[in-house]
Image: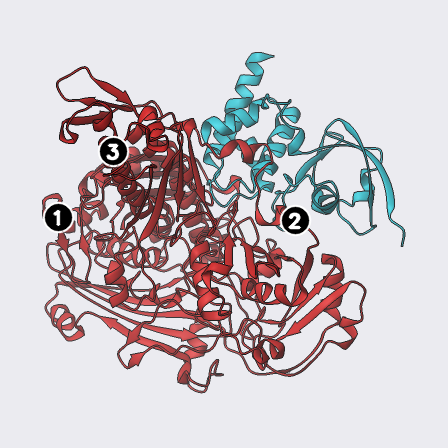
Chain colours: A red, B cyan
Amino acid sequence: MPKDGIGASVKRKEDYRFITGQGAYTDDIDRPGQSYAVFVRSPHAHARIASVNTAAATAMPGVVKILTGADYAADGLGGLPCGWQVTGKDGPMVEPAHPPLVADCVRHVGDQVAVVIANSAAEARDAAEAVVVDYQPLPATASIETAMAAGAPQVHDEAPGNLCYDWEIGDKADVDAVFAGAHHVTRIELVNNRLVPNAIEPRAAIAEYDRATREYTLYTTSQNPHVIRLLMGAFVLQLPEHRLRVVAPDVGGGFGSKIFHYAEEAVLTWAAAKVARPIKWTAERSESFVTDAHGRDHVTIAELALDVDGKFLGLKVDTKANMGAYLSTFAPCVPTYLYATLLAGQYTTPKIWCGVQAVFTHTVPVDAYRGAGRPEATFVIERIVETAAREMGLDPAELRRRNFVPSDAFPYQTPVALVYDSGDYEGTLAAALAAADYDGFAARQAEAEARGKLRGIGLSAYIEACGIAPSAVAGSLGARAGLYECGEVRVHPTGSVTFFTGAHSHGQGHETTFAQIIAERLGVDIDAVEVVHGDTAKIPFGMGTYGSRSLAVGGSALSRALDKIETKAKRIAAHLMEASETDIEFSDGQFTVAGTDKSVGFGDVALTAYVPHNYPIEELEPGLDETAFYDPANFTFPAGCHVCEVEVDPETGRVEIVNFAASDDFGNVINPMIVEGQVHGGIVQGVGQALLEGCVYGEDGQLATGSYMDYTMPRADDVPSFAVSTRTTPCPHNPLGVKGCGEAGAIAAPAAVMNAVHHALGSRGVSRIDMPATPVRVWRALNAA
Amino acid sequence: MAKHHISTTINGEPVEFLCNTEQTMLDVLRDELHLTGTKEGCATGDCGACSITVDGRLVCACLMLGVEAEGHAVETIEGMADGDKLHPLQQKFLEYAALQCGICTPGFLIASKALLEHNPDPTEEEARYWLAGNLCRCTGYDKIIRAVLDTAADMRGAS
């Protein structure tokens, strides 16, 4: 095995440019002659636009052009499309128009009304302030509760009661029958708090139009440039793919929020042809808060039925999900197919019903955010299991063990559609408990109590469905796209390799991980491998990076392309060594004839492919360049257990995480160092949700948490170091045996933290505290109990 | 209004530039001098992505006007390595993979360098407090803190 192959903690190839300040993010790029765009955005949550007067603004210094919603409508172009249609009990979801520039009615603070293009960003900002929009404010609704109340302000006329869809999975009567005979029923109500993704790089875009070639180019902060090209080209601007190039260069974090096709991308591309100059736009942070799709925002009631031994008999879950003002690209599938289908968790619960009502409100659209549906499912399951254990006087670890899907039960069909492929839930639980010194908790709790502190420990045994997704399955559930991945392996004449991937790295380390796989397979030095991503002009196609899919789907496409390379290279090697193809073996970069000492190196085969003098030219094309599309056979199911221990100061309500341990099963691991970092980052996003982050709208639809002074991001002094490890059950249905690791931390951590907080506060009579468990909330709960 | 002519030192080199009164040092670095290693994450001094040092003092370039650079010595990420020789912090960030998307990394490196110049032997708690002015959404801070503490130990051993 080469030293930089599969399983090695190879230093990341991309890091040199980042640590020396040479990363090239969208805002770092300047195009010759570029102009600057600033958007005029609604300050109201809901208002009719009576008029837009741009006369004064147009006369201001440096202004190139101002375009409004009326201009956009006049060009007869499309609205922003939704990529997933959920069909509810009463038919397909309500899918209101989502104009990139609004002409008649704004529906959330931040909705874009006009774009000002000027010679400098400062001039564009000044002129944007001079655009006079006559708004007639209308009543607004921001929360799920108020939006569903009788007589609530309507977000869209075509969605009575603000209902987008009313969807269910499972047979409710069947589940109700199980509850009737239960020994014990645990009931919880919970809120999965709304979050603002807050990638540290604000969204940005540069659009340009080349009159000579009639080609458009869009640089954008995207996790999936081909998806943007497809959505924007085919559905919004009606531009053919061959004249539309989308480049997503270095991207500074995504977490889901950069999956979606946003209005600014379409407006800039549309406007670029009108001004015949490149146009650049970079969001200000306050703009990010009111335009990046938010995450979570569920209100849920759940009930778990158990028998006398603590075996789970049935689970009923009733969830209301906030969609925001419009349907963002993948929003409808998040609280349905990415949520309710995960409600079996790691358990053998035989009967499950889940109903989901999705609701429009006058808020920023809500869509996938790290984990997307799966953190919400894990939070429901792991909070109710922990609560049931406490109610029944059982050790929460023991109650989980009694209900785990056993290791010999795979493939395991859950009652909510998914077939789990592999796992060892007892193994990850045991490893996490050992790392957390679970058995020593009582002594630590007593010691803390002596100091006047309340100590608690909480578990979260999560599962996620990753490797999104088998296209036919996704299509049958309403996806309007395939969810395969594409990769092209180009072996150059001297044996170096460029890999073009449709996945996109915005922190995941693909340039290293994919290179390790190639180094391992072809026996080439890792420095002889270059990974290219993020440019539709270079890469055949791609669906991008989200849902922990890059390695499970994109890596599988790479593996398939390498199979083709190896097959062809063997034929060339056989010719060179005058042997039968079936006798050729390949390892460590050498082709050998089995049972002989004849061999030829990979580099010689590559050169022969491009200099085919001695070559089977009648049977084989020259060149060594292969493309593969891989469509997964199933989802992958990473799973594991996270254990959090907290100490609460009853005087201040402050929660301190004193220990956090995790054991995760991600299938085979290519680069353990990268995987560890992914888990750390995910945990802190989960800790942020549990203790710090909460997006707050006023009843009038004004965002109260619109800056870093109001929205509490986790910082270095808020979190500890983590004890993380992996255990492996390989994925049985993809060539690398990998499952995905990007979202696990964000999925597992909120329940682990909140179970620990509830455990700590339980002795003081506190039974419910919602996320984020801020000091003021904890203090109030302690003093009200 | 006429632009201001500013004479300053950036990464050890004398530099002159013209700027408007309202341009921040961050705007000047990125837009006038094309030193784009210093990033804008918030422009309100809350995220630390634009961390630079001025006469050795750690500041947010977004909170400083370009004209204030007159006569001072500015250090940015572009000056951190000595030619091809990485600063020990850069080397350690590389070895630990103490970065993911990289957007906050220049700010963390500059802030960490300022920490170690201020306190060559920080405790973990001191390092976490010092770096609490820098936001990272990817790493969970764990590897950053370990890289900084390990660099501090190495640099103490070497001196």
What residue is at 11 percent from the left and 59 percent from the top?
Answer: A307
What's the residue type where badge 3 is placed?
Pro
- Which of the pair A622/A428 is nearer the observer? A622
Query: Callout 3: helix, strand or loop?
Result: loop
Asked whether, in this view, residue A318 is left or right of residue B128, the answer is: left
Can marks 2 and 1 be said to lie on one chain? yes
x, y percentage for residue B100?
47, 39
Between marks 1 and 3 in the image, the one whose residue lies nearer the viewer: 3
What residue is at 43 percent from the left and 56 percent from the top?
Answer: A226
Give the CA distance from mark 1 to mark 3: 47 Å
What's the residue type where badge 1 is placed?
Phe
Above-or-below relation of A212 to A25: below
Which residue is at the far right? B2
Instruction: Examine the image and state in which quarter residue A127 appears.
Output: bottom right
x, y percentage for residue A480?
34, 67
The residue beneath circle 1 is A410
Instruction: Examine the image and state in which quarter residue A642 appears.
Output: top left
x, y percentage for residue A664?
28, 40
Between marks 2 and 1 in the image, the one whose residue lies nearer the viewer: 2
The residue beneath circle 3 is A616
Chain ID at mark 3: A
What's the residue type where badge 2 is placed?
Asp
Q: What number of labels is visible? A: 3
Query: Callout 2: helix, strand or loop?
Result: loop
The residue beneath circle 2 is A30
Q: Could you classify mark 2 by the number of other residues whose Cα lies within 10 Å: few (under 14), some (14-19), or many (20 or more)? A: some
